[in-house]
Amino acid sequence: MADRFRSGRILLLGDAAHLTPPFAGQGMNAGLRDAHNVAWKVAIAVKGGAEAAILDSYELERRKPAWDMILVAVTMGNFVMPADAEQLRFRELLLAALGPYPNVRDYLIQMRFKPRPRYGAGLFLDLDAPCFEASLVGEMIPQPRVPTGQGTVLLDEKLGPGFSLITQSPAARAVATGVSHEMLGLPMAHVHLDSSVPWMRKDPSARPLLTHRDQVMLVRPDRYCAASFDPEELVGGLSRYRSLFSRDNLASSSAIERAVALSESP
């Protein structure tokens, strides 16, 4: 891993910032997430009035997830390519022992132990005090197929290139409809998903969204949930989120988080 991901106007992404062994097949994913994380911050600094210091949040958010994925790949490499006969025999005995337990075997072989796409610090509100135990704030949102008049499309296709507000209740929808689409400096779409319809409760990929069924979810352009608000708190909450884009607030809110993130890095 590079000592730092940003130096002034220079940003390191993908393999220039961190090299991942090939065993978990996650190197390209990590690079794409780097790019998506950086792109909207550059856009909002150039076009949306945010200060350039917003780019410091890139390393704050991406360093630990990139390192965690490297560790997963190293662990997989030790399993796929044992270094000696003893390790090879251990692997074969382990797989044989898991034969009667196909779910456990699949959990291992299909790498379901991979860490979920989630940030523990950065441009989010109330990460340390989530309103619900299953809150999606800080996580990449799920990707269900959403009904339309012409069939279904992936939720991603409805969110647009900027920020987005996701609502599921009539009260939340009414408030979100009145919000300025340029309030955060980039376009902001509004997508309403009716939590009362059966498909949301039946679709496993949509079910996590129900945690915030009475709230308004603010989703960043890189598809991570930035915050969630009760309807009556939406306008004030968006203003509070916008305040994170200033140098003073970025410095004060990230100093401790940066120290924690760096302490967990190699």
Image (cartoon, rainbow, N blue to C red):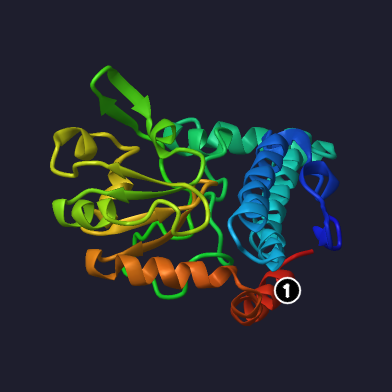
| 105 or 166, nearer to the observer | 166
Q: In which quadrant of the rendered view does residue 61 lie?
A: bottom right
Q: In which quadrant of the rendered view does residue 129 lie?
A: bottom left
178 to the left or right of 56: left
| 22 or 64, nearer to the observer | 64
Q: Residue at x 56, y 50 (%)?
A: 115
35 to the left or right of 226: right
The number of numbered badges drawn on the structure is 1
How crowded is the residue under tag 1: few (<14 C-alpha within 10 Å), some, or many (20+)?
few
Above or below, 33 relative to 180:
above
Image position, residue 240 (x, y; %): 44, 73
Q: Is residue 32 visible?
A: yes
Above or below, 187 relative to 154:
below
Q: Which residue is mark 1?
A: 263
Image position, residue 227 (x, y; %): 41, 62
Image position, residue 137 (x, y; %): 43, 60
Q: Residue at x 45, y 53 (%)?
A: 182
> For numbered disc 1, what is the local secondary structure?
helix
The amino acid type, in three-letter code, at marker 1 is: Ser
Image position, residue 187 (x, y; %): 47, 47
Q: Is residue 125 visible?
A: no
